[in-house]
Image (tube, rainbow, N blue to C red):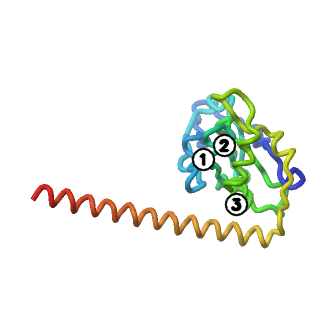
Amino acid sequence: MQEQVKMNASANRIVVYQPNETVRLAVRLENVSAEWCVIESIEDIPPDATQGFSTFRGGDVIWARIRPCMENGKSAVVEAEPSECFCGSTEFLVSRPKDDKVNPYYLQSLLHLKRFREVAAHNFTGTSGHRRVTEDFFKTISILIPPRFVQDRIASMASSIRDEARKLKADATAALDAVKRKIEARIVE
């Protein structure tokens, strides 16, 4: 995998900001959905507050490496132009395909697999309160990357299934809310 994906990549760009300028680039761990594999919100922060963060750019895959976030599957593709730079928690391991032979959505789906996360969890380092997967874990595993057209099909299928699951969950929530309203209306009568 190391041949095709740069692990712990950074934005590799120096940005000069004007005084009092805010930048839309902060992604916190809690703003990444483990359920839907998306960044739910990005915060505007002043440039001087970006020190000490991991940096990444559009098209990168961010993957939470600390427990329990990694075990829960917090990961997402940064949906932006490759020229857009972001910063976020240092608990994100940033993966960047080295060329167009690797679909970032396929890579994210692979990193999100329960079996992959179970193997990664066996490679945690650190104390019990701060257990995390290191970049070295990715140097020790060997993953076959299929041809791009296969990756594209898998990524598209995963996206369609997530979209359907999101719709089903919204429908179920609406049905549950309707039942609760009926029960409350009967009690109040």
Residue named by callout 3: 105
Q: Residues within 10 Å of mark 3 (few under 14, many from 20)?
A: many
Picture coordinates of residue 176 (x, y %)?
33, 61
Seen as rendered, the residue at the extreme right is: 3
Comparing 89 with 128, the one in front is 128
Element marked by disc 1 = helix
Please give the name of the residue rendered at 87% of the width and 50% of the height, measured from the top-left corner: 2
Element marked by disc 2 = strand
- Which mark, by number, is residue 64? 2
Q: Is residue 103 left or right of residue 4?
A: left
Residue named by callout 1: 72
In the rendered structure, are the residues bearing label 1 and label 3 in contact, judged by CB atoms less than 8 Å apart? no
Comparing 173 with 62, the one in front is 173
Q: Quadrant of residue 86?
A: top right
| Residue type marked 2 | Ala
Q: CA distance from mark 2 to mark 1?
A: 9 Å
| Residue type marked 3 | Tyr
Q: Quadrant of residue 52?
A: top right
Please give the name of the residue rendered at 71% of the width and 42% of the height, measured from the top-left corner: 121
In the rendered structure, are the residues bearing label 2 and label 1 in contact, judged by CB atoms less than 8 Å apart? yes
> Which quarter shows the C terminus?
bottom left
